[in-house]
Amino acid sequence: MADVDVIHEEAEQPQQTILVIEDEKSISQLVRLYLEQAGFRVVSAADGPSGLGLHTREQPALVILDLMLPGLDGWEVCRRIRQQGNTPVLMLTARQTEEDRIQGLDLGADDYVTKPFSPRELVSRVRAILRRATPATTEEPNAVLQYPGLSIYPAARRVEAQGQPVTLTAKEFDLLLLFARTPNTVFTREELLSRIWGYDYLGDSRTVDVHIGTLRKKIEQNPAQPRFIKTLYRVGYLFDPTAAQNGGGDA
């Protein structure tokens, strides 16, 4: 393998485990090299079933997932990971169409990187996802945000809708927490991209719309007429606690 300019920074939480599910050996080795140099522990699988088995055994902090896998494709692997919990998923694939990106995000992926890619950028995105997925140590454990039919537990990164637990991806939770902590504040799509995905995120505003749509499906009784997260046409979104209390829907 050619010499690479490795990253010498420490990961935020050294020895967090990253699961790489990738059948191209050269790519898997390259990703492993950069992640290990960044301070992470890496386990890898070359097919879908083996990747799911490692996910169950290792309980990784994050999964890097190729889509074109033998045995079980990445779409199905992502679905099954989402059924098991909130492990962040970064899709790494040669499929570059907008439809593929939207499908990946709809399935619960936290980020989508296309090949060819920059290994340094990949590590940066991994760090960004893990920062958002890690509870803040200064968060008061009992600082619960409660609205009619919706409870948000920031320290535990847990959400209940209508008294039932809701499984959210890292970005979905971050979006909801931002909204709930700043009710009646209008956010443009660009502001949400900056706050939740980071200023250097290379995606487009459709990413925000996709995540808002999946978030509504999980917390709203009627996603077509949302009570909590309102759309301001051609402007952005806001969290409306008054409408939630009164049972009002989207205008």
Image (cartoon, rainbow, N blue to C red):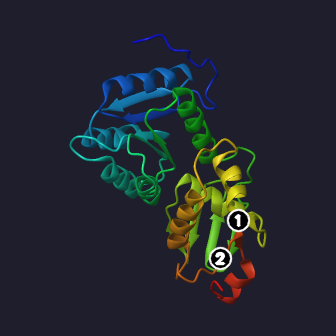
Q: Position of residue 156 (x, y in %)?
A: 61, 54
Q: Which mark is residue 57?
A: none
Regarding mark 1 in the picture, which secondary structure is present there? helix
Regarding mark 2 in the picture, which secondary structure is present there? loop
For this orientation, the residue located farthest to the left is 71
Tell me if I can see residue 144 in this picture.
no
| Residue found 56% across the figure and 15% down from its top | 5
In front: 96, or 133?
96
> Is 221 drawn above or below residue 120 in the view shown?
below
Q: Position of residue 152 (x, y in %)?
A: 64, 65
Instruction: Say whether residue 232 is left or right of residue 7.
Output: right
Q: Which mark is residue 179?
A: 1
> Is 211 drawn above or below residue 53 in the view shown?
below
Q: Position of residue 102 (x, y in %)?
A: 46, 57
Q: Residues within 10 Å of mark 1 (few under 14, many from 20)?
A: many
Quote the CA–CA distance across marks 2 and 1.
9 Å
Which quarter of the image is occupied by the N terminus? Answer: top left
Residue type for callout 1: Phe
Tell me if I can see residue 64 in this picture.
yes
| Residue found 53% across the figure and 78% down from its top | 223
In front: 141, or 166?
166
Q: Which residue is mark 2?
A: 228
For marks 2 and 1 on the same chain, the one whose residue lies earlier in the sequence = 1
| Residue found 29% across the figure and 41% down from its top | 53
Residue type for callout 2: Phe
> Is 112 drawn above or below residue 79 in the view shown?
above
Which quarter of the image is occupied by the C terminus? Answer: bottom right
> Is 218 drawn above or below residue 85 in the view shown?
below
Query: CB under 8 Å between callouts 2 and 1?
Result: yes
